[in-house]
Amino acid sequence: MKFTRTITVLLVVLISSQYAWADEQKITVDPATVLSTLDKSHPRLMLKDKDLHYLKKQYAEDKVLQKCVADVLRSAQGYLKKPKLTYKIPGLLLVSRECLQRIHALGLAWRWTGQEKYARKAKENLLTVCGFKDWNPSHFLDTAEMSYAVGVGYDWLYSYLDRNSRELIRKGLIKNGMEAGLRAYEKGKGWTKQKNNWNLVCNSGLIIGALAIAETDPQYAERIIPAALKSLPLALKSYGPDGAWLEGPMYWHYATHYTAYGMTALETALGKDFGLLGIDGVSEAGLFPIYSTGPTGMYLTFADCDSSSHQSISCMFWLARTFGNVLYAESEHAQLAWNKAAVEHLIWYVPKPTKKAPGKSLDKYFRGKVEIALLRSSWDDPEALWVGVKAGYNQVNHGHLDLGNFEMDALGVRWACELGSDHYNLPGYWDRRRRDGKRWSYYRLNSFSHNVPLLGNQSQDPFGEAKFIKFESNKTTPFVLIDLTDAYKDYARKAVRGVGLAGNRRAVLVQDEFEIENPCEVAWGMTTKAKITVRKNGLAELALKGKKLLAQVLAPAGVNFSVESAEQEPPQSANKGYSRLMVRLPNQKGNVRVAILLSPVWQDGRVIKTIEVKPLTQW
C-alpha cells in the first residue's frame, strides 16, 4: 500500500495501454469469461484483508492515518445509537445514502477493532433494508446506492453473518438490486445511455452488488458487468480531455466517488479495469477541484451546485494512488488537516508524500464541453486574487442560464458570487428542454441571478452555447475571451465577453462587446453579499468582512452603477443578504461596449484605479 501502489499502477498502465480511445470504440466482454479472475474469498471488495493489515502496521507511525481511524470510529460509535432505517417515498435516496454511511463506518470499525457491537449493528441495518419491498427502481439512483451499501456490507461482514442472515441479505440484494438492474439494462433505461453522473453511479452500484455475490450467483455479474462496461465509457469520456466535469464541482464529487467505487471493486475482485482508466481525462480529474477552488476555499460554482467551501474529497486518494499523482495526495492531505475523514480515506489511503508536487500554474484552461478558465495571482497567499469563468451549453444536465458567468475572490472574500441550486422539488424544476420551461422561471437558474450580460431584460437562450475563442496565460495580464453570440441572438449579431487580470494581477477586468441588431436595454450585473455604496463618476465601493473592493465603469463614459436586491419570495430560496451591482443602458443599438474594473483595496493601500480600455480584438 505504498504511495505509488507500484503493482497496481503497473497493472493499470499495462491494461489501459491496450486500448486506443476513439469515440466509436466500445468495451466488449465475453460474459462467459468475465469472472475468470474472480477472487472467491471475502472480503474482496474495496479493502481486502491484506490492505487492512498493511494499514494497521502503518498506523503506529502515521499521525494522519491515526486521525482518519479516530474519525471513522467516532462516526461508527454515533451510528450505534441510530434508530432503524425506514422505507420512505419520496426520499429513499437519502435512506440509501444513510445506509451506505452506516455500513461503511460500522463495517470498517468492526474490521479494525474486532468489537462485535459494530458488526451487530451493521447486520441490523442490512437486514432492515433487505426487507424493504423495493429500492425504488423508478428513481434508479436509490437502487444503485443501496446496491452498493448492501454489496459492501455483505462482503465485509461475510464471516460474521450467520447462514440465515447471509441468505436474507443475498436474496434482498438480488430482488431489489440485481433483478432491477437487469431490467434497466434490458429496457435501455436512460441512465444506461447518458453521459452524466447517473451513468457512473448506477453502473458502479450494480457492479459492486453483482461482485459481492459472484461466487454463489454468477449469472448476475456475467450479465451486469458486460452491460456496465459498455455503458460506462459514455460518461467517463465526459472527463475529457483534461479532467473537468460538465455538471459542476458538486457533481464532479458525486460522479468521481462512484467512478472510484466501481474501479476499485473491479480491481480488488477481478484484478483489472478493462481499460476504463485509459479514457482521456480520467487521470487528470483531480486537477478540477484543485484549480476550481478559490483562495477563500469556495468552488467556482456552476450548474446545480452550492457555494460551499471545498471539503475533503476522499476519492482524491484513489486518484493519487491509481495514477501515481503526488499533487492529488498533497492536496487531500492539506484538506484532512482541517476536515473530518471518511471511511473512503482508509479504503484508498495514501501516506503524505515525502517529495513536493511540481508547482501549479497560476492559470488553467479546462477544454471540455463546458469550458472553464481559472486565473489567479498566487497559490500561497490566502488573500490572493482569483477569478473563474465558464462557457459551454445551457442544456447541460443540471445547467443554469449562465454562459460567461464569473466568480471572484480577493482579500479572503468571495466578491462575485453564484447562488447555486434551488430546491429540487420546486414545480417544474427539471423542465429544461423547452425555451419556456418552468425551470427557467426560477431566479437562481435563469440569467437574472448570474454574473452575465442581460439583453432586452431577458435570460439567455436556454439552447444557447458559448465557446472560448482565446485563452492567454502570461505573466501580468492573463485573460479569456468568450463568444456568447448564440445565447443572445434575439438581439445581437455578435456578443463577446472578455475576463482578465489587470495591473500585474491586482484587479479584474470584465469587458463585454455587442453588435446590437434589435434595439434593447443592455445590462451588466454581478451578485454579491458585500454592502454596496454607489459613488459618482461611475464608481461603487463594496465592503465585506472588513475588506473593500472598488468597482469602476470604464466604458461607456458617464454611466453610474445602481443596486438591486437579489432576494426572492418563497417557495424560492430567499437569497437573504445578497445584492446585485448593476449597470443599465437603455435603448442601445449598434456597437456597444461595457467595461468594468474590479479593484481590491490591498493591505498596502494600493488599488488599480483605471486602465486603458482596448477593443477585445486587441486583448
Image (cartoon, grey):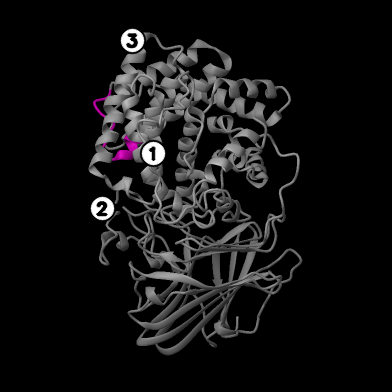
Task: Judge the density around disc 1: few (<14), some (14-19), many (≥20) Cα neighbours within 10 Å.
Answer: some
Bounds of the magenta segment: 132-144
Question: Is 255 located above or below residue 35 in the figure?
Answer: below
First along the sequence among labels 2 and 3 = 3
Q: What residue type is labelled 2?
A: Pro
Question: Which image quarter holds the N terminus?
Answer: top right
**Which residue lies under the disc numbered 3?**
164
Q: Which residue is drawn at 37% across and 55% down?
A: 397
- Asked which secondary structure carries label 1, the reply is loop
Give the residue pinned by disc 2.
Answer: 427
Amino acid type, callout 1:
Val
Q: Badge 2 local density, few (<14 within 10 Å), some, or many (20+)? A: few
Task: Using the image, determine if residue 346 lies above or below residue 111.
Answer: below
The Cα–Cα distance between marks 1 and 2, rounded to whole angstroms, is 43 Å
- Measured as percent of width and height from the top left, residue 327 is found at 66, 47
Q: In which quarter of the image is the C terminus?
A: bottom right
Q: Earlier in the sequence, mark 1 or mark 3?
A: 1
Q: Label 1: which residue?
A: 29
> Which of the 4 image quadrants contains residue 447?
bottom left
Is 255 positioned to the left or the right of 10 in the image?
A: left
Identity, as a three-letter code, of the amino acid under mark 3:
Asn
Camera-nearest label, 1 or 3:
1
Please, what secondary structure does the residue beneath circle 2 have? loop
Q: Is residue 140 magenta?
A: yes
